[in-house]
Image: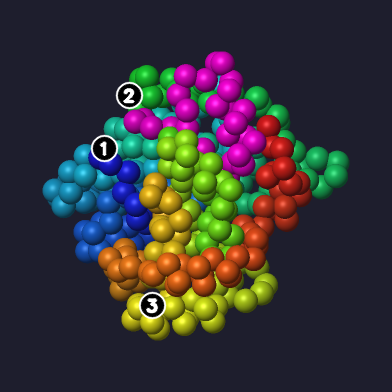
Amino acid sequence: MDTFPRNGLGTLNMPNNESGTEAVRCAIEDAGYRMIDCAVHYNNHEAVGRAFHDVLTRGVVKREELWITTKLPNYRHKPEEVEAECRQNLKDLQLDYLDLYLVHWPISYDEPTSKQIATFPLNDYGAIAQTHVPFIDTWNEMEKLVEKGLVKHIGVCNMTIEMLERIRYEPRVKIQPYVNQVECHLYMQQGPLVDYCTKRKMHITGFFLFGGDGHIPGPRLLEDPVLQEVAKEVGRPAGSVAIKFVLNLSPIMTVIVKSSSLAHQKSNLNTNFELTEDQMNRLRSRQRFRYANEVEAIYKSNIFSDAY
C-alpha cells in the first residue's frame, strides 16, 4: 500500500494462538482494517502471520492493499543483527516485505532468557542493563533494509524532539524516519512533539488512545466526564470520540487501537463524524501529562530524557 492509513489495528496483548489469529482475520475481513501494527515484543507474530497467510491466500485482500508494520526489538540493535532479525520477522509473519519497520525503543539491551520483563538482564542498580549500541549504527542498518527491498519505510517509536533532531542533523543518515510512534491520548496530548512532526511532514502514530485502559491507577480515560459529555453531544461512543480527538491533532496523525471484538473493531474504525472547535477545545483542556506506559517502572530509568 502506498498511502499510510490513518486508522489501524494494534496487536498488543493478542494471544499467540488461534484466538489471536481469528481476531486479526476478523479485523481485516469483517471490519475492513487495512493497517495492522505488530511487534516482536508482543510475542504473537506467529498467530498474526497465520491471519495474514489466510486472508492473502483466500484472496480476501491483495498484499498491496495492506499496510503491515512491525518493530525491531530492543535486544537486536547491534548492526550485525538487524537484517537477520528483519528476515526472521518476515518469516514469522509469512510476508515477503514490510510496509513499515520501526525501531521499537531508543534503548538496547542483551537478549533476555525469556520474553518476560522479570527475566531481563539487570545491572547492579536493579535497572535493565543497557548495551548502549549507538543508535545511528542501528539506523544505518535499517536504511539498508529499504535498499534491499525488505521494507518500504523505516521509522522510530517513543522518541523525543531532541532525539529526532540528532537523527535529522547526523551526516551519516540517508533516510529520515517516516514516522514516530508514541503514546498519545486525551491525557497525554504530546502537543510540542505533534507540532514538530507535523512541520517536518513526519507521520506521527498514536497508541494507547484509551489511556492504557487501566494500566495505571487514577481516572479511566473513557470515563472522563468531558469526553462522556462530548460523546453524548455527537451521539457516538466515548472510544470513537477519543480516537477522533487524536486524529484531529494533526493532518498526518495516524492511530492504532487494539480490539479482539468485531463490534469494537468496527466502532473504532468508524470516525466519519466531526468535532466542533468548541468540543476540541474542551477535550484539549483535559490534558494531564500522564503516561499510561510505565516506562520508568519497567526500565528503571528515564528513557525520555536522553536515551542514546
Quarter of the figure with the C terminus: top right
Q: What residue type is labelled 1?
A: Asp
Answer whether labels 3 and 2 touch (C-beta < 8 Å): no
Classify 17 as above or below 98: below
Q: Looking at the image, which residue sits at the far right?
A: 124
**Residue depicted at x 62% and y 35%:** 163
Answer whether labels 2 and 1 touch (C-beta < 8 Å): no
Residue marked by disc 3 = 237
Q: Which mark is residue 2?
A: 1
Residues at marks 3 and 2, CA–CA distance in whole angstroms: 41 Å
User: What's the colour scheme?
Assistant: rainbow
Q: Can residue 41 be seen in this view?
A: no
Residues at marks 2 and 1, CA–CA distance in whole angstroms: 14 Å
Q: Is mark 3 on a helix, strand or loop?
A: loop
Q: Looking at the image, which residue sits at the far left?
A: 59
Q: Which amino acid does label 3 sit on?
A: Pro
Q: Residue 149 carries which label?
A: 2
Residue 170 in which image quadrant? top right
Report the span colored magenta.
151-177
Quarter of the figure with the N terminus: top left
Quick one: 39 or 205, which is closer to the camera? 205
Question: Picture coordinates of residue 192 (x, y %)?
Answer: 58, 48
Q: Which of marks 3 and 2 is in front?
A: 3
- Point out the tag, 1 or 3, that comes first from the N-terminus: 1
**Mark 3 surroundings: few (<14), some (14-19) or many (≥20) residues within 10 A:** some
